[in-house]
Amino acid sequence: MSDTINQVRLQVLPAPSGWRLDCDLPVEANYFRSGGRAEQAARDLAIRLSGLGHDVRVEIHDRQMQIVATQIYFASEDAPPLGAREPESANGVSAASDDIRGD
């Protein structure tokens, strides 16, 4: 397994009825009615991904698709090696089982 740091891009983009959080990783987009909630979800996800060893770039777009803010979250130095499994609790469930949910 390679120790190369993966770079991830998160984007908060306008959507027909609110805002969308897109990610380079193969996950479904999340939708929010509030732009502020979409931005907070992007920051929260960036922190989690940086803790797992990814450099993360968060881009916030306005309704005209212009980038209005960018933040970089660098991979944590004490991140587990890429490909390492999360610790499991006594009942076999991942210790980090919470997820980000849209409103």
Image (cartoon, rainbow, N blue to C red):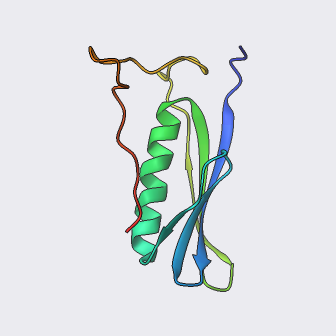
91 relative to 14 in the view: left or right: left
- Which quadrant holds the C terminus? bottom left
- Residue 91: where, in percent of width, then height? 28, 18
Q: Residue at x 54, y 17 (%)?
A: 84
**Relative to 88, is 48 on the left or the right?**
right
Q: Nearer the viewer, residue 54 or 102?
A: 102
Q: 42 or 68: which is nearer to us?
A: 42
Where on the picture, by quarter, is residue 33?
bottom left
Measuring from the top left, give residue 23's x and y in whole percent: 63, 53
Q: Is residue 6 left or right of residue 41?
A: right
Image quarter of the N terminus: top right
Which residue reaches farthest front? 91
Q: How many marks?
A: 0
Vertical relation: 82 (above or below) 27: above
Q: Is residue 61 visible?
A: no
Tell me where residue 4 appears, x and y as whole percent.
71, 24
Task: Name the residue rendered at 67%, 86% in the picture.
Answer: 64
Please give the name of the residue rendered at 56% of the width and 39% of the height, measured from the top-left corner.
74
Q: Considering only vertical position in the picture, is 17 above or below 70?
A: below
Report the residue at 59% width, 35% height from top: 54
Residue 25 position in % (x across, y down): 66, 45
Up-down relation of residue 78 to residue 70 (above or below): above
Residue 30 visible: yes
The residue nearer to you, when weighing 72 against 23, is 23
